[in-house]
Amino acid sequence: MTDDALSAEQREREEALVETVVASFADAPDDRLREIMQALTRHLHAFVRDVRLTEAEWNAGIEFLTAAGHITDDRRQEFILLSDVLGISMQTVAVNNEAYLDATEATVFGPFFVTDAPFVENGGDIAGGAPGQPCWVEGTVTDTEGRPVAGARIEVWEADEDGFYDVQYADDRIAGRAHLLTDEEGRYSFWGLTPTPYPIPADGPVGALLAAVNRSPMRASHLHFLVDAPGLRTLVTHIFVRGDELLASDSVFGVKESLVMDFDEQPPGTPTPDGRVLADTAWSRTRFDIVLAPEHV
Ligand code: BEZ
Ligand code: FE
């Protein structure tokens, strides 16, 4: 039913309620909290009125949120997952990482970062024994004037070829993650794993929602980066694999064309950049040059 089909009296009742609720926040001492609560009220009421939400649908929504609460604990965060599959996480990333010259685009953080990942020297191996195809990753960190950033801290983390991060195993392993520092010329390099696709946790209410709307929980193959350097905007991003068929249907809308990289397949026996011997193993290599925006633009 459109708004036009409502009687004038009905429309007035609905609009009066919106204004009453908005006014209830008028005395909030914090200006920002007032702004957020009043805008949230207007948007939520507009949604209920737009779709003419039934009481049964309202109940189903409450049950969904209750189930999300029940499955959430300090290892599982179903509300962030919900935000991710609704594209709200990516919209928040977009709003908070405004495009600036050629600064590298940000994308969703995801739940699998851990602090205190081991330090690895440039050229070192971050796989930590995780299964997967070796991948040589190299690049530079510069600012938007093209100046190399020495000593930038780069955190990298990724799933193994079975689609699991180390923290998803029960044995306290640390694998597929590390931090490194750029050298004097802003360069970095490491051995990781060629990224492979994996599903977001789909055994809870968010997974049920995706199934109900015929959406896949799969994420496009990716490798996470968090790059931090004084005076520059911290970058949280990933790189994706050109040719991956999931690029167009990433379940959390994280893919940006500028973050899709060539991962060049190297047949077994191809000499490696650092002399590592991979006689019987195919490997891949990629390059990711990172540009950091100024901290305040
Ligand atoms: C991830 O990339 O690790 C991720 C992102 C959003 C939801 C689940 C996983
Ligand atoms: Fe991930």
Image (cartoon, grey):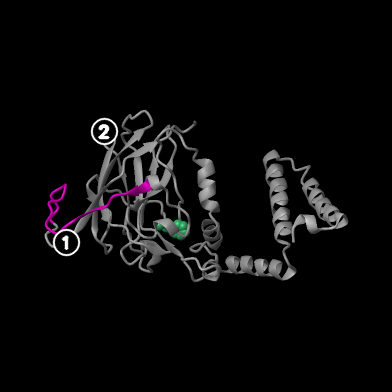
Q: Left or right? Give the position of 51 relative to 174.
A: right
Q: Left or right? Give the position of 43 relative to 85.
A: right
Q: Observer-nearest residue: 35 or 245?
A: 245
What residue sits right under mark 1 in the picture?
A: 281
Quarter placement of the N terminus: bottom right
- The quadrant of the rendered image in which ligand 2 is seen is bottom left
The location of residue 179, given as percent across then percent down, is 33, 48
What residue sits right under mark 2 in the picture?
A: 185
Mark 1 crowd level (few <14, some 14–19, many ≥20, 10 Å Cα): few
Which sits earlier in the primary sequence, circle 1 or circle 2?
2
Closer to viewer: mark 1 or mark 2: 1
Tell me if residue 281 comes above or below residue 37 in the rendering: below
| Residue that lies at the very extreme toward the front in this rendered image | 5
Q: Residue drawn at (48%, 57%), measured in percent from left and top?
A: 252
Mark 2 crowd level (few <14, some 14–19, many ≥20, 10 Å Cα): some
The location of residue 7, given as percent across then percent down, is 85, 57
Question: Magenta region: which residues?
Answer: 259-277
